[in-house]
Image: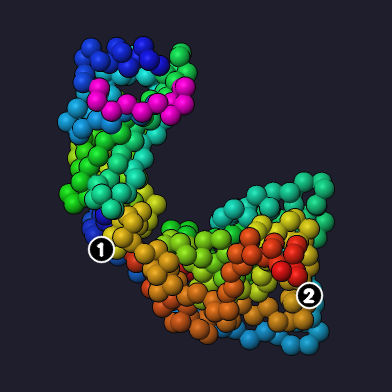
Amino acid sequence: MGKEYIEKRTVISPEGNPIEIDPLKDYFCDARPKSCKSASGIIEKFANWARSESLWVLGFGTGCGAIEMRPLMTPRFDAYRFGIQWRPTPRQASVFVISGYLSVKTLKRVVRSYEQMQNPKFVVALGSCTINGGMYWDSYNTINRLDHYMPVDVYIAGCMPRPEALLAGFDKLKHIIREGRAEGANKYADNFDWYKGNQKKIIKDWDMPDYNW
Amino acid sequence: MQTIIENLQKHFQVVSYHQQRENLGFLIASKEVAVGLITHLRDYEGFAHLVLLTAVDWIEDEHFQLTYLLHHPEKKVDLGVRVMISRENAEMYSIHHLWEQARTYQRELREMFGINFPGSPNVDKPFILEGWEDIPPYRRDFDTKKYSEETYFPRPGRETHDPAEYMKKKLYPNE
């Protein structure tokens, strides 16, 4: 399998000089994620209120639950009135909705997208496949428990949950954020080695840096 | 459908033909004859559409059974050509020169069953599984439940309810 794109090599710069590049070191951050303490008191309460009222979801439909996110953009179950909108890139999103089963191939891309999101970030897990494997519990290619690979804030059970259930889940996420209990990003930074070990056990051809920031 | 089989008798020796429905029949061909037979069916008989190419793992008889399903657009009949291949060194001649979609089917079979189609472009590239090191997962001697329990951390406390038993208890609780 051609992995030339991540190996050290010499390229010709636009000016014509040969330069040595090492993609994994040069294009990505070397440091590990750090957990940051939240502010306290009324500022944090205001910040949490603001975060809960503008949940920008990453537009990455990972599995079969992506079809349950589409009704939320229609006039019947309007999600935009809650401040929930879909953003194209991980840098602009704060909520990652893992919709359904995750195969090994998708998990690699999901981990990369999740690590590129900015703090504070929250994960909403849709469907029973994220809880205990669901319908694909004995499959050779899908994971069984999502919280071994990334910290999850809200699980929404169902196969697939109806859009009303999704809105109720977002409502629960808002309560959790307002109480200050949504510390997924800090949990990821604190247990980074454990999460990374679990991910690497499954994703056998790891051709990304350890922390994709 | 019978006329097609009669036409085939002129060129090939039709030994085993099974008519399942009035518009579906299956022929069993040997490995050497199969590609010629499929080309003849496509060019002379008019089976212009390759519907699918799948494999069945007969582990008790120790062979794979490949099925090429062809469709006749005018007469609206389906004809399946079955080819038996051995399970060790599973190889078959490629038909990617007849239909382009055969490349994807052959790539999938190579990854999932381990059946090689030498000459087919991109047949080595991984299709769905990335970084797979075990035996090809669709083979019957691959225990997928055991693999799943060992690799992916299962959540303890999972129950399974047999639907028939559950409905029986619900509808007739006294028995």
Vertical relation: B108 (above or below) A101? above
**Residue range corresponding to the magenta coloring:** B14-24
Counting from the top left corner in percent of width and height, residue A14 is at: 32, 49
A73 in magenta: no
Please give the chain letter of the residue carrying mark 2. Answer: A
Vertical relation: B40 (above or below) A121? above
How many labels sit on residues?
2
Vertical relation: A205 (above or below) B74? below
Instruction: Count residues near mark 1 (Cα–Cα under 10 Å), then give few for <14, some for 14-19, many for 20+.
Output: few
Counting from the top left corner in percent of width and height, residue B169 is at: 71, 67
Residue furthest toward the front?
B175
Q: How is the image coloured?
A: rainbow
- The residue to which callout 2 is attached is A175
- The residue to which callout 1 is attached is A8
Of marks 1 and 2, which one's residue comes earlier in the chain?
Answer: 1
The residue that appears at 68% across and 72% down in the rendered structure is A154
Q: Secondary structure at mark 1?
A: loop
Side (left or right) of B96 relative to A113: left
